[in-house]
Image: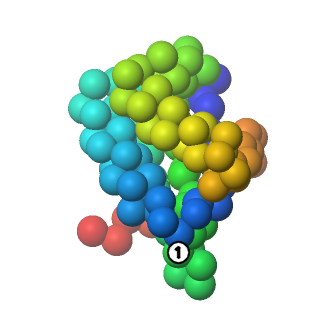
Amino acid sequence: MERYLIIRMQIDPAHVDEVIAAYKEHGRVASQTEPGLVRFDVHQEQADPTRILLYEAYASAEAHAAHVEGDSHKRARGLVDALIAQGKAKREHLNLTPLFTHATSRH
């Protein structure tokens, strides 16, 4: 069964660029090396640039488990974990059950 996640993070302003760079690199590596990764999006809230949102989609729970074990995931997650331990970040995970989607290609 597919796996869909949204991770919301609130990052201390002094570390926003560092976190974005870490997840940009993580997404690049994961998209090149993980065949079960369907989508890995990183968004920044316009009204509050300290709020970062990740949207992740995997072909299966096993594909997500493999993703979590990857070195690039451990580096990016480790950075945010360290910021959380210092009181400089917050993270919330949402595990999604898809009901339906309406999407169009705009390419």
Position of 24 compared to 60: left or right? left
Q: Which residue is mark 1?
A: 49
Residue positioned 58% across, 60% down in the render:
11
| Amino acid type, mark 1 | Pro
- The image position of residue 86, as x and y in percent, is 65, 46
Position of 70 compared to 10: left or right? left
Secondary element under disc 1, as helix, strand or loop, is loop
- The image position of residue 69, as x and y in percent, is 48, 17
The C terminus lies in quadrant: bottom left
Query: Dividing the picture into quarters, in which one does residue 12 lie?
Result: bottom right
Q: Dot 1: within a 10 Å radius of its alpha carbon, few (fewer than 14), some, or many (20 or more) residues?
A: some
Query: Dividing the picture into quarters, in which one does residue 31 lie?
Result: top left
76 versus 36 height, above or below: below
Q: Nearer the viewer, residue 28 or 19?
A: 19
Asked which colour scheme the image uses, the reply is: rainbow
- The image position of residue 29, as x and y in percent, is 28, 34
Q: Is residue 63 visible?
A: no
The N terminus lies in quadrant: top right
Q: Nearer the viewer, residue 2 or 105?
A: 2
Q: Residue furthest front?
A: 86
Residue positioned 36% across, 39% down in the render:
26
Q: Residue furthest bottom?
A: 47
Q: Is residue 16 visible?
A: yes
- The image position of residue 9, as x and y in percent, is 63, 55
Q: How many marks?
A: 1
Residue positioned 44% across, 53% down in the render:
19
Q: Nearer the viewer, residue 29 or 3?
A: 29
54 versus 17 height, above or below: above
Residue positioned 39% across, 55% down in the render:
18
